[in-house]
Image: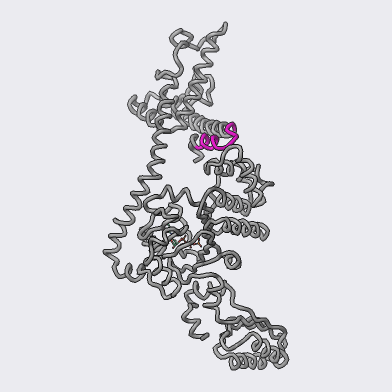
């Protein structure tokens, strides 16, 4: 992007400091010219045409002159056709055109100034023919040609952008859904029927799927309806990133998408934002299908991506003003609106600093504020709290809670279980592209956590026999208990909660405290993190666990 002056011009349009962007653009040109100047000196020395090649006599501003081109012009060894080809090829580069415009305009102006004076330098051609030309004409050394080419390039780039945003996306969807997937299905029938059947061992996941397949019309009114969504990356090797998932998310709901690295969370988000195409199935946002009405869907989504997507040479305030304008906030209200969002994430102190100077956590806060603002109905937050300090995390939780209460649907991914436990109304744990369970945090804890977590600290000086006796005692007293960890005299047990009330467990352990010389003990309900580990760790699946703990 830094290579394109159009970037700086666009950037300048959105920021209030277009002067800065122009200066940046000019600085870039000067760097470019300086590089060419050095290159030219080397080449001229090599070919034995020192200095005058790099500083031709009619040049008023040698460094700003496109020296390399002059070199091409001077070198008689090069054929005319080759020279013309190179010069015409350079017209494709907007940088070259802009530099030529500035350079030729300045040279023409300087020649005119000298010729209108009393003593023009002898080497300047002050004939009427030379000084009364129209600088915007298409003649040699005038700037008309470059300006026309620049306008055409700009227009073509705009069309290209439009094409990329619309037709190309449809083409990619078509290729992915009908061509690549069609071929894949033909050659890998078994794998497709096994991996992409959509059937689940979990009854909540299965019920949700049946509900969606049974009442597709009624559920279209949901904020988000994901229906048999599959995403395959057709690369080598082929990756089945999302495998036939179905879920509905209602307005005012905060849905947590949990899973280990590579489970398919970000891919799902990318599909919801239209960044990635769907391989099969569909996603509806307020009744608009993502495969058919992408633009409508995009205008309803606020997205905080995993990696920052911020223009680093803008200030926090400028970028928020830019987004507020894009959301159509009226000009008189913009300042107030932006200030409200800045203060919601306590960004006031950093508002007028360049984003490049922000710390990672501050950038994250800014990205979250941008995702939450605007007239969206669905907000996607991909690990928003990564790198945030505890204070900032609390702000995030507050902002997410009141945004959800305002009626928006929020989908969040996070590796912080306590965060999901605190403000997700429902969540799903994803493993290798599939939902393994679905429900509210409390539902999952009750459903899969029919156990207590017992931690016992034994005095280090306790005899080895006593430790073994204690283990035997726990196994006999709580049938089905499992010793999960043992380290430095600390024993970590999972105890079935069935037939063991809190009172009974405490009573037994009070007795054991005296008998086995225990330093301390604690009993707690299973946490969401432990449920997550049961599901997400293939070595410790639900099945294994249930075999051990009835
Ligand atoms: N552009 C891509 N091309 C090919 N494979 C990809 C691409 N993006 C993701 N994948 C693969 O798809 C799978 C799911 O990746 P994804 O980024 O969705 O995981 P995730 O759950 O978001 O992980 P994390 O928690 O690390 O963000 C992974 O196996 C990954 O390697």
Residue depicted at 55% across the width and 59% down the height: 383
In percent of width and height, residue 193 lies at 32, 69
18 in magenta: yes
Rendered view: 201 above or below 151: below
Colour scheme: one colour
> Which image quadrant for residue 221?
bottom left
Residue depicted at 47% across the width and 26% down the height: 100
Work out whether residue 200 or residue 29 is closer to the camera in this orientation and state it: 200
User: Ligand 1 shows up in which quadrant of the image?
Assistant: bottom left
In percent of width and height, residue 501 lies at 62, 86
Rendered view: 486 above or below 256: below
In percent of width and height, residue 374 lies at 55, 48
> Which image quadrant for residue 136?
top left
Work out whether residue 263 or residue 255 is closer to the camera in this orientation and state it: 255
Q: Residue furthest left?
A: 186
Work out whether residue 488 or residue 144 is closer to the camera in this orientation and state it: 144
Residue 193 appears left or right of 479: left
Query: What segment is highlighted magenta in the picture?
Result: 7-19
- Magenta span: predominant SS is helix
Rendered view: 202 above or below 179: below
456 in magenta: no
> Which image quadrant for residue 242?
bottom left
Residue 48 seen anywhere in this rendered image of the structure: yes
Across the whole image, how many numbered discs are drawn on residues? 0
In percent of width and height, residue 176 lies at 34, 55
């Amino acid at each position: 992007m830094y290579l394109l002056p159009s970037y700086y011009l666009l950037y300048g349009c959105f920021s209030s400091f277009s002067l800065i962007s122009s200066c940046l653009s000019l600085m870039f040109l000067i760097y470019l010219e300086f590089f060419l100047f050095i290159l030219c000196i080397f080449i001229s020395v090599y070919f034995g045409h020192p200095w005058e090649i790099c500083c031709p006599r009619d040049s008023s501003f040698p460094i700003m002159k496109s020296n390399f081109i002059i070199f091409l012009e001077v070198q008689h060894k090069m054929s005319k056709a080759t020279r013309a080809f190179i010069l015409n090829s350079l017209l494709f580069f907007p940088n070259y055109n802009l530099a030529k415009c500035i350079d030729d305009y300045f040279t023409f102006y300087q020649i005119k100034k000298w010729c209108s004076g009393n003593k023009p330098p002898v080497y300047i051609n002050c004939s009427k023919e030379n000084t009364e030309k129209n600088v915007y004409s298409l003649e040699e050394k005038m700037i008309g040609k470059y300006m026309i080419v620049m306008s055409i390039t700009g227009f073509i780039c705009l069309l290209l952008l439009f094409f990329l945003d619309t037709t190309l996306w449809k083409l990619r969807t078509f290729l992915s859904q009908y061509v690549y997937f069609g071929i894949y299905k033909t050659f890998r029938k078994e794998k497709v029927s096994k991996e992409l059947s959509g059937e689940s061992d979990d009854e909540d996941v299965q019920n949700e799927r049946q509900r969606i397949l049974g009442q597709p019309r009624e559920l279209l009114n949901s904020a988000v309806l994901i229906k048999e969504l599959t995403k395959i990356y057709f690369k080598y090797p082929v990756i089945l990133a999302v495998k036939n998932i179905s879920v509905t998310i209602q307005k005012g709901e905060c849905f947590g998408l949990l899973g280990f690295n590579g489970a398919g969370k970000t891919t799902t988000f990318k599909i919801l934002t239209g960044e990635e195409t769907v391989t099969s199935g569909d996603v509806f946002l307020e009744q608009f299908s993502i495969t058919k009405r992408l633009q409508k869907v995009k205008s309803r989504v606020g997205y905080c991506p995993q990696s920052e997507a911020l223009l680093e040479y803008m200030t926090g305030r400028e970028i928020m003003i830019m987004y507020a304008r894009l959301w159509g906030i009226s000009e008189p209200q913009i300042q107030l609106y932006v200030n409200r969002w800045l203060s919601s994430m306590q960004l006031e102190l950093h508002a007028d600093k360049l984003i490049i100077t922000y710390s990672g956590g501050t950038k994250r806060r800014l990205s979250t504020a941008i995702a939450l603002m605007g007239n969206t109905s669905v907000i996607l937050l991909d690990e928003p709290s990564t790198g945030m300090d505890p204070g900032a995390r609390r702000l995030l939780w507050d902002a997410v809670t009141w945004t959800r209460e305002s009626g928006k649907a929020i989908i969040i991914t996070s590796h912080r279980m306590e965060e999901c436990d605190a403000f997700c109304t429902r969540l799903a744990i994803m493993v290798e592209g599939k939902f393994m369970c679905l429900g509210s945090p409390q539902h999952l804890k009750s459903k899969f956590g029919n156990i207590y977590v017992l931690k016992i600290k034994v005095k280090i000086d306790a005899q080895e026999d006593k430790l073994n006796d204690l283990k035997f005692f726990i196994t006999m007293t709580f049938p089905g208990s499992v010793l999960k960890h043992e380290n430095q005299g600390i024993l970590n047990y999972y105890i079935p909660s069935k037939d063991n009330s809190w009172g009974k467990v405490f009573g037994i352990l009070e007795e054991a405290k005296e008998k086995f010389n225990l330093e301390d003990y604690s009993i707690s309900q299973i946490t969401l993190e432990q449920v997550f580990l049961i599901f997400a760790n293939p070595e410790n699946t639900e099945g294994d666990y249930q075999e051990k703990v009835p």
